[in-house]
Image: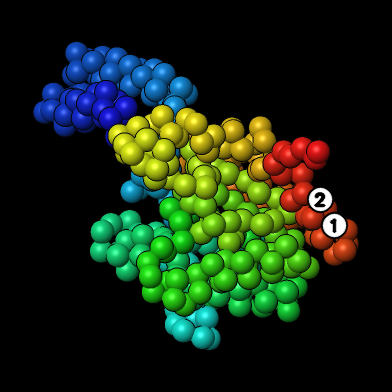
Amino acid sequence: MDFEKPVVELEIKLDELKKLPLAESPEITEEVRYLEEQINKLREKIYTNLSPWEKLQIARHPNRPRTLDYVGKICTDFTELHGDRLCGDDPSLVGGPAFLEGKRVMVLGHQKGKDTKENVARNFGMPHPEGYRKALRLMGLAEKFKLPLVCFIDTPGAYPGIEAEERGQAGAIAENLVKMSILPVPVIVVNIGEGGSGGALALGVGDRVFMLENAYYSVITPEGCASILWHDETRASEAAKALKLTANDLLKHNIIDGIIDEPLGGAHRGFELTANVLKKILMDNLIELKKVPVQKLLNIRYERLRKIGAYKES
């Protein structure tokens, strides 16, 4: 990414120095130490003052950890379940039962790829209706077996193709919204990257909603917003600022309940640290929510949703 280039250039130079035949000499060792200090200072300067557009770029980073990365790190005995029992299976949305610190949970999440081939296979993390209906089926299993539900959001949006519309994309998303609103088990949602409109919201109704520091949530992409408002996609950075899509913006408006810190540069620069922090937050909140009686849990969830947004009665 453009704003990272100064750091990357110094990191390349540092690697070259470390590979020199005389890398152990006092002169080279001193130069390495000096470069490491400069890199750390530059990282702090860049990554602690990111604009909304720059945060969005980090959320889209190809090396950013995906749902299955987090599930594999923080859960055990995850068993992926497939198919919606109506049309087929959608690999852009994954889910199944797992254990989190010995506690049974149901996990759901959008799944992107790490390269072009995998992204094509995963439809770039944009689910078809059968993906959301698979999620609905697994929510039903969570209800039947009284499993807390953990959802990971990471999608640019639901797939907008004509075949998705023909198979009922809007209806599938709406059914998920209804189901999650009344699901009689604790529901925790974590936005780990991109949160695109209704495609993200279909897994986004919960008792607790968190976002990673560099994740975003928006009704439309900045590029789409700039194209519609100004007929100019090059003004996407301006649109990103206006959309108030960062975790800090959403926390300020009480749309989310907390922000999960990332290492400088993003979760891909410190995956284990990010996963460990995420695991602790999930466990703490699950323990707390499981103590709440079901009806009270549903009432609190309803009130939480009612408080989102601002309106005026005349």
Residue in the image at 36% along x and 60% along y: 124
Image marks 1 and 2: residues in contact by CB distance under 8 Å: yes
On the rendered structure, is 168 left or right of 162?
A: right
Residue in the image at 32% along x and 27% along y: 3
Residue in the image at 69% along x and 69% along y: 179
Residue in the image at 51% along x and 59% along y: 199
Q: Which residue is mark 1?
A: 299
On the rendered structure, is 86 left or right of 176?
A: left
Residue farthest to the front? 314
Q: Quadrant of residue 101?
A: bottom right
Percent position of residue 299, x then y: 85, 57
Q: Mark 1: which amino acid?
A: Asn
Q: Mark 2: which amino acid?
A: Glu
Judge whether 13 appears above or below 158 on screen.
above
Give the Cα distance between marks 1 and 2: 6 Å
Percent position of residue 66, x then y: 44, 55
Q: Is residue 265 visible?
A: no
Q: Is residue 129 visible?
A: yes
Q: SS for tag 1? A: helix
